[in-house]
Image: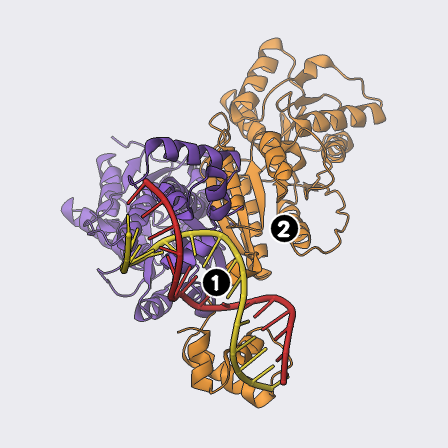
Chain colours: A purple, B orange, C red, D yellow
Amino acid sequence: MDIFDIARLAGVSRKTVQRVLNNSDQVRPETRDRIIKIMEENHYHPNVSARRLVKKTTHTIGLFIIQDPAKDRIYSDDQFYSVVIGAMINACSLRGYNVLVMMTELNDPVSVLKLYREKSIDAGIIISWSNVQAIVDQILSANYLVGVFDQNNLSRRDSSIPIPILQNEAGAVEATNHFIQLGHKEIGIITGDEDNLAAMERFEGYQKALVGAKIPLKSSYVYNGQFTEESGEKAVSHWIKEGALPSAILCSNDHIAFGALKALRAEGLNVPDDVSVMGFDNLLLTEYTTPALTTMHVPRIEMAVTLVEQLIRQIEEKPLETIRPFQATLVKRDSCCDKN
Amino acid sequence: MDIFDIARLAGVSRKTVQRVLNNSDQVRPETRDRIIKIMEENHYHPNVSARRLVKKTTHTIGLFIIQDPAKDRIYSDDQFYSVVIGAMINACSLRGYNVLVMMTELNDPVSVLKLYREKSIDAGIIISWSNVQAIVDQILSANYLVGVFDQNNLSRRDSSIPIPILQNEAGAVEATNHFIQLGHKEIGIITGDEDNLAAMERFEGYQKALVGAKIPLKSSYVYNGQFTEESGEKAVSHWIKEGALPSAILCSNDHIAFGALKALRAEGLNVPDDVSVMGFDNLLLTEYTTPALTTMHVPRIEMAVTLVEQLIRQIEEKPLETIRPFQATLVKRDSCCDKN
DNA sequence: CTGAAAGCGCTTACAG
DNA sequence: CTGAAAGCGCTTACAG
């Protein structure tokens, strides 16, 4: 069943069928309706490979999930990205784009580039817990389109590629201010990885808020950690051993907070009565811990959808809109206590 | 840059390049190496659309995520499928298959069939929380290949399509026996949805185990629920109101167990000292509840990989292996207490 | 409104 | 080992 069969069944030329497919107004309405009916009856859908071969466009976006053995595995350990990925797939489907998903390792840029070069995709999106600057550079220098989630995974700001920006510093200021408003003076922070941009920005925000409230910064309340549960546990043990446990702990992400909650419970301390804990990210899990975790919500779905929209604009050569940076917002649950 | 350019650069005919691409041994090794070098230098990858047009095969599997507004939304509320989806994508990538992911609604079979008819995919996999028999029937009657995760989403057993089978009954027997071995006599169950196959099989297993241990079945210990957190909460409230709370509760899935834990805590009851609770599925979340949930692990990754393997066998017209049913296995955590 | 021709970049026989 | 030709199912000018 091809375009020629439809034409024969309808008693018209192949080109007329073509015009119907292209929504051209050069076809008499009766003819048009008759042809559409015949196509439907025969379940005719144009062969995409033939079309792509001619049009040199695929209406397909590649979603590259780049795993790093040293980090959480996306789709199994990872709690953050499944919502992001789902939102992207949904956004593409709604806009009529196909999504080709591929999993690769960080050290395998070849299989990513292959998909572009063999003309399987019009553009790509990279999702990873690691720095993907190297692979992005290769894609750009081959003149292909790519977007990245999020700014954290690149070492350079590059305004030419779609990338959502989260205002980490402002988020951390808000989080810290929440503690301050609740009457806390002894506010500690467990930071994320030193080489991580978001971790550093969140730490900046913590410092700014304290300075703003004229609360002296105590270096003993800063634990240089990583974005892991283990780090949260270690920080708490460390503080307890030193006899310098803060009354409120800002965890640079939710995983750290899960670890902190666990360690505090193991030490027989009550959250929030003895110690208040706040996370950052708002993973689904935060609703299920005991107590439920107060945290900063990162608008991942909006960020994902905006990224997809920007990328599609690039594909369709429409003017890019400037994306405003995204704000994290406070979600109050049960892990912070009011000292006032 | 096409196959002809490569041939010219190498000073051979187009067909010779073709033979190199097909790994034919009809090419002199020196020629072959020279051509491969030239292809690599020029980043040449054959245009897939042209190839597909001729070969009538895409090396692509469609992954249909079929949402049902009445159920948990896969990829956002859902805790079960992201691991399954990740495993499938990974399994396909490893075997050289592309994965086209699409999200649709239950009442939209057209967009699923379109992907087959326009020759975008060789086969499809359906993932859903609902019964997808109708859409599967349409796919099969159009003579396309499809697999479903899992047996629960079809109303009929159809041995012609790849579908992983989980031995729900045996799993529930093992779960119930665990309670019995711990010395429990008052064992309750919160069932899943009545019209759900797995729910009924798990209930059967519960009954069998009690009969096997000569423990009388008490209908007051059976709460007819649904696979939701809310159902777990309601069951506990109901039992407490009736003054008939069992000492051990078998929850037909983890969500029910989360609800039960929550309600028990709200009532001031301690798990596991006052009441033991067991889940079913082994969602990632079970490690994070307080106490960590003892549950039956469902081998979702293995089920997903096997489904992909079977489907690829069908695509490649290799003989199908008979898949053995999968077993759920007990994962002991902290929500069950030993009465002995 | 409609037709006939060329071409997209491959693969597939067929011939040597 | 290598070549020349036909064809996959569309789209794109060009002509009427």
Kindly indicate the quadrant of the structure image that contains residue B28: bottom right
Position in image of residue A160 (x %, y %): 23, 61
SS state under label 2? helix
Q: Where is the N terminus of chain A found, in terms of image quarters?
A: top right
Which amino acid lies under the numbered mark 2 shown in the image of this protein? Val
Foreground disc of the pair 2, 1 = 1
User: From the viewer's perspective, is residue A301 above or below residue D14?
Assistant: above
Which amino acid lies under the numbered mark 1 shown in the image of this protein? Ala
Residue B308, disc: 2
Left or right of residue B73: residue B172 = right
Which is more toward the observer, A178 or A29?
A29
**Can see residue A129?**
no
Q: Are marks 2 and 1 on the same chain?
A: yes
Which is more toward the observer, A171 or B242?
A171
User: From the viewer's perspective, is residue B225 above or below residue B285?
Assistant: above
Kindly indicate the quadrant of the structure image that contains residue B25: bottom right
Residue found 59% across the figure and 55% down from its top: B91
Tell me the subunit letter for badge 1: B
Residue at the spot of label 1: B50
